[in-house]
Image (tube, rainbow, N blue to C red):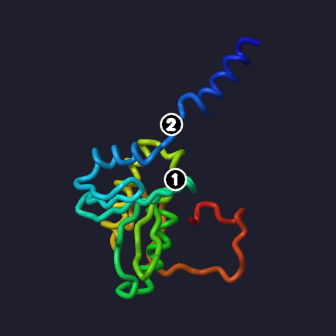
Amino acid sequence: MYKSFISVLFLFLSFTGFSQEMTNEKLEAIFSKKVDTISGYSGYWEMIHKKRQLLCITDVNHNRMRIISPVAKTNLLDKDLLLDALTANFHSALDVKYAISKDVLWSVFIHPLKELSVTEAESAIDQVANAAINFGTTFSSTEMIFGGESTNTNIETPEEPIDSNQLNNKF
């Protein structure tokens, strides 16, 4: 009985007692310590980190936040680079993704605001900057890469849908 009580108490505390609710004020404090320069107001910040422009936009009412960095105008990119960016979204961009909006390719981190931890916010700043810096080369947001190939390699596209049982270690 005592072990059951301790187990339930531990689970309860792990989901409530130790959780932290991220706020705009906490985010601004994290940014102020982490980035080179910061300007803006609560819910919208412009920053420079690793010589890259980053923007953070939050929406408290919808519990969302995003950190973004412009990478390139899409009209300057060829099809192969865009395909490589999509491949990177799966293999090397990790917690950030490449996305297009208003004719600009961005590196983007999107997350629920309240559930964001300090560690995740700090990592997101680095990953967004790294993905923007590494676009066109490794396309990576960290030093970890989970396989993948660029469009420069001949990759056979299956004509039939792939059965997941047949994948093994192909990807």
Query: Of residues 134 and 37, which is closer to you in this image?
Result: 37
Name the residue: 46% across, 45% down.
Answer: 23
Query: Of residues 144 and 121, which is closer to you in this image?
Result: 121
Q: Position of residue 60 (x, y in %)?
A: 52, 53
Residue 130 is at least partly visible in this image: no
Q: Residues within 10 Å of mark 2 (few under 14, many from 20)?
A: few
Q: Position of residue 121 (x, y in %)?
A: 41, 48
Quick check: 12 left or right of 31?
right
Q: Earlier in the sequence, mark 2 or mark 1?
A: 2
Seen as rendered, the residue at the extreme right is 1
Please tell me how many numbered marks the rendered image carries: 2
| Amino acid type for the residue under numbered disc 1 | Val
Residue corresponding to mark 2: 20
Question: What is the secondary structure assignment of the residue under circle 1?
Answer: helix
Residue 88 is at least partly visible in this image: yes
- Quadrant into which the N terminus falls: top right
Q: Position of residue 22 (x, y in %)?
A: 47, 43
Question: What is the secondary structure assignment of the residue under circle 2?
Answer: loop
Q: Residue 160 occupies which quadrant of the picture?
A: bottom right
Quick check: 13 left or right of 88?
right
Residue corresponding to mark 1: 60
Query: Of residues 122 and 95, which is closer to you in this image?
Result: 122
Quick check: 68 left or right of 158?
left
Name the residue: 49% across, 66% down.
Answer: 89
Q: Position of residue 153 (x, y in %)?
A: 45, 78
Question: Vertically, is 157 above or below 64?
Answer: below
Badge 2 vs badge 1, beta-carbon distance below 8 Å: no
Question: Vertically, is 140 above or below 150?
Answer: above
Query: Of residues 141 and 113, which is closer to you in this image?
Result: 113
| Amino acid type for the residue under numbered disc 2 | Gln
